[in-house]
Amino acid sequence: MRIIVADEDLLALQNSVSIIKSVRPEDEIYAFEDCLELLEFIMENPCEIAFLDARMEAMDGIMLAQEIKKIIPKINIIFLTMYDEYYRQAMEMHASGYILKPLTSGDVKKELSDLRYQLAEKEDALLDVVCFGKFEVKNRKGEVLKFERSKAKELFAYLIHKKGAECTLREAAAVLFEDEPFDNKRQNYIQKIISSMMHTLKVNEVDSVIKKDFNSMAVDTSRISCDYYRCMDLNMELDFSQEEAYLAQYSWADFM
């Protein structure tokens, strides 16, 4: 999970980050003194929680929160401030929390236990999948899975794209080979691609992420941590460069 923290006071910012990290050591925490840099960052990086100082000179926390929510509507905004005058505005914009400084670990735990938007925890995830930019699949050790066939990797990418919806053999063939006929030769080749994909997953002891039926297959999204899924869950609208496009190397993903 990603958490962003914004405060123009560097010492206060460092203190807030330190306290939040003591409560959530497993999370990625990003600190910003500059509001514009923060907005540029979240355009390309889904974040679930934002701790914002309510009073800043360049852009006050209320205004910053409004801009953040335009990019990530379902982000949890928690205000940090020495003043209670912003409380009404914070509540009107449906903030998740409001903490009066000095910040304590108890404050952080309390607010995180009662968030407006629940977090989709992936503590039991077997794979970490990157869809924006170069498609990559990593196991829990952070090792990149090496697929024996490029088409096997592409098939897995398409199953990730389907987000748990079933994919038939005919559909897989249409995606991987476009307008080529679905004859016996193509069916046999698709079976080889599926076998290759499953072999790679089995070698890495993560083959349980695939749910197979007689003529279809799907990924078990509960066992996968994925940047694309996080964006969907947070209802984000992203504007990536060509190098960071969604599943950039696969033509069937262009329309996304």
Image (tube, grey):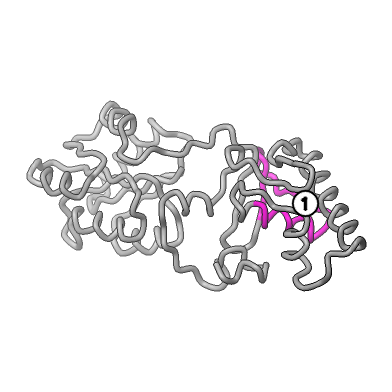
In this rendering, would 87 be left or right of 234? Answer: left
Dividing the image into 4 quarters, which one contains the C terminus? bottom right
At 87% from the left edge and 58% from the top edge, which residue is drawn?
Answer: 187
Asked if residue 26 lies in the magenta stretch, the reply is: no
Q: Which image quadrant for residue 59?
A: bottom left
Q: Residue furthest left?
A: 85
The residue tagged with tag 1: helix, strand or loop?
loop
- Picture layout, residue 222 above or below residue 135: above
The residue at which mark 1 appears reads as 146
Three-letter code for the amino acid on which mark 1 is drawn: Lys
In this rendering, would 14 be left or right of 57? Answer: right
> Is residue 202 or residue 50 the one in the foreground?
202
At 61% from the left edge and 38% from the top edge, which residue is drawn?
Answer: 223
Q: Which image quadrant for residue 179?
A: bottom right
In this rendering, would 43 be left or right of 251? Answer: left
At 55% from the left edge and 73% from the top edge, which residue is drawn?
Answer: 242
- Picture layout, residue 121 above or below residue 130: above
> Is residue 160 or residue 226 the one in the foreground?
160
How many residues crowd around disc 1 within 10 Å: few (fewer than 14), some, or many (20 or more)?
Answer: some
Estimate the x, y position of residue 79 in percent, counting from the top left: 22, 44
Q: Which portion, as a residue range, is magenta?
A: 136-159
Estimate the x, y position of residue 90 in percent, counting from the top left: 17, 46
Estimate the x, y position of residue 195 in percent, counting from the top left: 85, 48
At 30% from the left edge and 64% from the top edge, which residue is drawn?
Answer: 36
Q: Which image quadrant for residue 3?
A: top left
Estimate the x, y position of residue 198 in percent, counting from the top left: 80, 45
